[in-house]
Image (tube, rainbow, N blue to C red):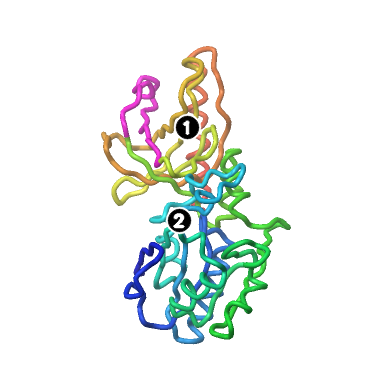
Amino acid sequence: MKIIYLHHPYNQNQIKDKNVVLAMGFFGGVHLGHQAVLKQARKEADQRDLPLAAMTFDHHPSVVFPKPGLDGTIYLSSVERKAELMQKFGVDLLYVVSFTSNLAKLSPQDFVDQYMVQLHAKVIVAGFDYTYGPREIADMDHLPTYAKDRFTIVTVPELLLDGEKVSSTRIRTDLKQSNVDHANLFLGYTYQTTGLVVHGEARGRTLGFPTANILSDPKSRIPGIGIYAVRIKIGSKWWPGMASIGRNVTFGEHRPITIEINIFDFDQEIYGEMVRVDWYHYVRGEIKFDAVEGLIEQLKLDEKNIRQYFANLTI
């Protein structure tokens, strides 16, 4: 898959002179709803023997147009992760457009002309709620007016799962509430973050549960406080483990939130490694113990339960 980064106004020489089917959206998390758009777009491309292109933004429009309750700088998927998922779901060419104030000033007609027609789109595929300007004048219902019969329009309907709309908003809420199990259901894959292994307090080793302390990418949305079943990728190999996101309240009040992972059957120093973490399953909340012995017994039980969880996954 080829990736082309565009900054408005872009140079037309950056655009391949070849017709495409173009999937439009922010694709935050590339969840099941987005996958439905990509699947339909891939079908349209195959029927016409055209490449499948997709267009997304490098950061959320809320950076330019602040939206209450939404931090536009923290994401379900980085641009790199989004590109990886896009390729997995059949995209041949990805346009990553920088969402700036200058871009936001475009009228709906100018946006359609410059970011659909001039990208040589013969078919535009987008979700029912896709907008390219103010919703009241720039939604999918208005697109035929701006298209002027220059391309075909395919609108993908709302995707419901268990009677609920699949949305990035719901997935963000799930992660905040530690409900990675439900987030994964709506994503259609296991939620993943990246981070750097750094030095911590080295307390886990004294407890018999040494941990890798992960400094997470500050742009990545991490799950809420709790104990989780995870897999961590070190180099080219994945390892199962149990992760703690919390304040280590047994050892004091008002401590910072840290991410610590006890990696099963692993005994190597990995400081400085960039790792990936797949968040499979929420096990329990953080507990403040009166004595360290209670914490150790709970960790033993957590390890037993998480090993069994992964054993059941492979059955």
Which quarter of the figure has residue 100? bottom left
Residue nearer the viewer, 241 or 150: 150
Residue holding disc 1 = 244
Q: Is residue 253 magenta?
A: no
Say the numbered circle drawn on residue 98.
none
Instruction: Give, as a single range, the part of the protein colored magenta.
Output: 198-217
Q: Which residue occupies 33% across, 72% down?
A: 14
Residue labelled with disc 2: 100
Tag in front: 2 or 1: 2
Q: Position of residue 34 (x, y in %)?
A: 55, 63
State the SS at label 1: strand
| Spatial separation of the CA atoms under disc 2 and disc 1 | 37 Å
Q: Residue 104 at x, y = what percent?
A: 51, 59
Judge left or right: residue 104 versus residue 277.
Answer: right
Give the residue drawn at x 40%, y 66%. 9
In this view, the residue in front, 134 or 210, is: 134
